[in-house]
Amino acid sequence: MTRFVEVIARRDCKSFFTSGMEICRRRVKSRPSLRGDLTATGQRGCGSGRVVAKSTAFRYQKHEPPGAPWRARQPEDGMALTFKGGIHPPEFKHFTEDKALVEARRPGLVVIPLAQHIGAPAKPVVGKGDTLKAGQLLGEPGGFVSAAVHSPVAGKVLKIADHPHAMGGLKPAVIIEPAEDGGDGEWELMEPIAEPGRVEPEKLVERIRAAGIVGMGGATFPTSVKVVPPKGHEFDTVILNGAECEPFLTCDHRLMLERGEKIVRGLEILLQITGARNGVIAIEANKPDAVAHLKELTKDSARISVVKCKVKYPQGAEKQLIKAVTGREVPVGGLPFAVNVLVQNVGTAYAIAEAIYEGKPLVERALTLTGPLVSEPKNLWVRLGTPVSELLEQCGGLKGEAARFIMGGPMMGMAQHRFDLPVAKGTSGLLFLPPPPPEAFTEGPCLRCGKCVDICPMNLVPCDAALYSRAGNLDEAERYGAADCIECGSCSFVCPAKRHLVQSIKLLKPSVLKRRAERARAAK
């Protein structure tokens, strides 16, 4: 049986293009073994590629010989690893890239949200009036995909109440008044594990769960869940993400330079937990000092290598980093364990080392407070729960009125409207920007230029995915890849018509994902 599949032509297929972007029709044969996925080997105009039509989105993939083994990629001299697509926004890292981490002052008030991670919020185990030690458990995991939260200071619980949350709305939080000494009183730590190499991996995973460690790059997925692949899968490679591709942010750069030893020890623990043969620390080429430092730290390791990646956004996105470092492509709708790879942020590895060797839960992190309006931009070592207003004061305040306050980087961060929000586990940056020009908000009609298609790191068709998302058309939005969008914002950045592409896709994406999950449950 044959059927027609519309394939979005890319500039790679030159004969498909006459002007801008066209839609071609290709006849392919159904293959039941692929469960509805239709595959056709590229012919005229497709070079050595192949066109792959998935049930949810279209892709143009580079052909690989059948049975080709996975292999780690090594850049040639002077070259850097990368992926297809991506953009080159101004870096703006000069504000803080040469500034060492500075320990922030102890907060006058601490606000610990019970939801600082993907999954169920933590369940409080303390109450109003309780006296706390630094490091004491405040909330236990609320489910399998959840994470514990701990007190970063010694003090007293004032109340457990709803508080403004960085993701919007009001969410439960434990509000703490630090002790008179600033909260540096007695600590409640877990038992250190001096020789993790002699401990069962399951016990190390349990320690990570008890410490409340989540992905520190911003995704905040509970690490204890991520390091254990589903049944039938295994990891052969662990990649530490030191790309830090977001403009302005430099805290991971400084962490690698100043505390690289613990990062390497955290990677060694991850290799032991997963049984992976290879550990890779991937760093963008704009951090040559970090590359050199970590190469020196790992020179005697037979299992760990440091690789240099091309300076390109979103180099630090999980699937793009896997492609750059290993050459493997995560399947559409799949996760990295499908290609036997685990990716963790360098900050996560640091937190793992502290939890194992020192028994310390995740109660502090590095972040970058920066922007052209900040009097003294800094890289700070901060206790979680510290209000943004207190950190801003420690950086000399603002030189003018900030029209935009973003938690995270300018590409994927979340715009905020108040300064009493607390630093959370996934807060990598606090960015203060002047108002944009008025024309930045004026959208024009789509020019069908195909620029968004050319640079999309997920090989989607953002212009059409956004069009159908705005129209509320779930079927077509899913067909053009809305569910697979990583929300990097590259399409909006390059659009000459200033269309709000990623914003439009994000509006409908939860509904598309919900429907996909319902279909998956119904199929079981």
Image (spheres, grey):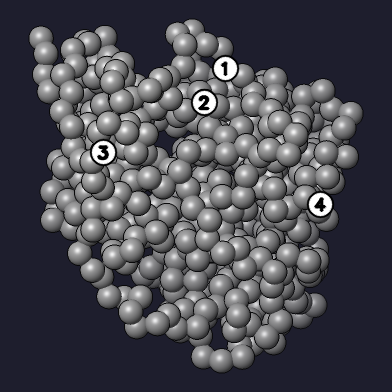
- In the rendered view, would you say 183 is above or below 264? below
Tell me the amino acid under the disc marked 2. Arg
Alpha-carbon neighbours of circle 2 within 10 Å: few (<14), some, or many (≥20)? many
The residue beneath circle 1 is: 70
Quadrant hosting residue 294: top right
Label 1 vs 2, first from the N-terminus: 1
Q: Quadrant of the N terminus?
A: top left
Q: Tell me whether circle 1 and circle 2 mark residues in contact (CB < 8 Å).
A: yes
The residue beneath circle 2 is: 328
The residue beneath circle 3 is: 17
Measure the alpha-carbon separation of dots 1 and 4: 30 Å
Tell me the amino acid under the disc marked 1. Trp
Picture coordinates of residue 191, whole percent (x, y): 79, 42
- In the rendered view, would you say 254 is above or below 84? below
Q: Residue at x 79, y 38 (%)?
A: 265
Residue 64 visible: yes
Residue 346 visible: no
Tell me the amino acid under the disc marked 3. Phe
Measure the alpha-carbon separation of dots 1 and 3: 33 Å
Label 2 vs 4, first from the N-terminus: 4
The residue beneath circle 4 is: 289
Label 2 vs 3, first from the N-terminus: 3
Label 1 vs 4, first from the N-terminus: 1
Front position among marks 1 and 3: 3
Q: Residue at x 56, y 50 (%)?
A: 312
Picture coordinates of residue 478, whole percent (x, y): 22, 41
For residue 279, side relative to residue 231 (left or right): right
Picture coordinates of residue 321, whole percent (x, y): 56, 38
